[in-house]
Amino acid sequence: MHNPNDGLKHLLLDLNSYFASCEQELNPSLREKPIAVVPMLNVETTCCLAASYEAKAFGIKTGTLVKDAKQMCPGIIFIQARHEHYVYFHHQIINAVESCIPIAQVLSIDEMLCELTGSQKKIEIAVELSKKIKNTIRSKVGQCLRCSIGLSTNPFLAKVASDMKKPDGLTLILKKDLPELLYTLKLRDFPGIGPQMEKRINQFGIVSVKQLCQLTQAEMKKLWGGINGDRFYLWLQGEDISLPHSKSQSLGHQHVLEPKLRDRKSAYQVTQKLLIRAARRLRREGFYTKKISLHVRFADSYDSFDSYENLEETQDTLTLLHAITRLWEKLPQHKPFKVGVTLSNLIEEKYHQFSLFKTESRENLMQTIDKINDKFKDKVYFGALCDHNKTATTKIAFRRIPKMSEF
């Protein structure tokens, strides 16, 4: 007999080897072959963004260096990332899923969460719905686009379930199976437990999931050092405890420089371009910023450079460019390898305080330029950047999906 306490509430869909699967869908000659998607070709020190399951069989995964991947799988095929295609498929997949069930939250480019309602909470109906979603994606979007689906009583366990069987898995975690069903997992299989957190847990004498699940709520709170411990304890019990909604606190872009751009002048121009893109996002998403940060890693030093400047709240590109120039002047004399800019201390437009000493006309000009570029594919740009206008093109931030107009 169905136990109402085992009622499923959440369905999490995780697309398998997403970037690699998109490439195999676009190019049938790549199917059933070991491939890896990389940021740029012919650069040994870059890493794999995604690997097909044929490549994963050799131990290659996201983050594996190209030079190591070649040794692990001599026949591997490297494909330069084409993010505009991944965003296109992403939107097609959303349409396919929503023809079966509404999406409650898009978690990333390859993950989405759905809430089960009414009869969908019943095991047999939830399973059939999951199968329908899989078949709909294959028939409407592409045969190579497989996904693993996790069903459970809260989003945390639904995520854990989605990772338990790949590719093309379907896993249920019910309250009646807890916590024993989790004992075969590793600590790092839980979202929120990375290398540092695992080390902290080990220092408390906890080396297995079984030991973790046997902790009391008070012990779990002490282990995490606060309210996150309470949430983790309740999630492991199958309780549906939601996280408070948080608004974006920062936005930015970073870019690993191609070898030919690893000089100060070129790196500076790429940094300017990243900032211009971030400022455009700032306006698009309806924010002003009060802080700008510059981050630089070097090719010839283990040191890195981090500096920031506080600002009067702004969304004006020229104001931000002047600020990044001042930060750049403090940069040590090393060879840049990776550059990044971050805009933080964000304020929503509705709370923006108008300055008595500044005119809004330049910010209006920037918004006009944004509209032109949205319509005509970035035809308007700063003249000083014309030599590098095609560098540092839009990339996927896994937690933020760019709009097609950004490519």
Image (spheres, rainbow, N blue to C red):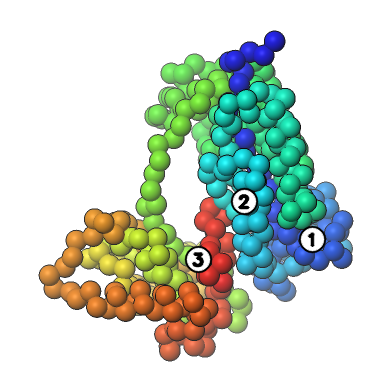
Mark found first going from the N terminus, 1 or 2? 1
- The residue that disc 2 covers is 94
Q: In the rendered view of the protein, which quadrant contains the C terminus?
A: bottom right
Q: Nearer the viewer, residue 83 or 135?
A: 135
For label 2, the crowd category at 10 Å Cα-Cα, with few meaning under 14, some 14 to 19 and many 20 or more, is some
- The residue that disc 1 covers is 24
Query: In the rendered image, is residue 154 in sight?
Result: yes
Q: In the rendered view of the protein, which quadrant contains the N terminus?
A: top right
Where does the image place residue 4, in percent across and percent down from the top left? 59, 15
Quarter of the rendering containing residue 71: bottom right
Which dot marks residue 254? 3
Height in image: 214 above or below 374?
above
At 34% from the left edge and 65% from the top edge, which residue is drawn? 292
What kind of element bears circle 1? helix
In the rendered structure, which amino acid carries the disc numbered 1?
A: Gln
At 41% from the left edge and 70% from the top edge, which residue is drawn? 280
Quarter of the rendering containing residue 271: bottom left
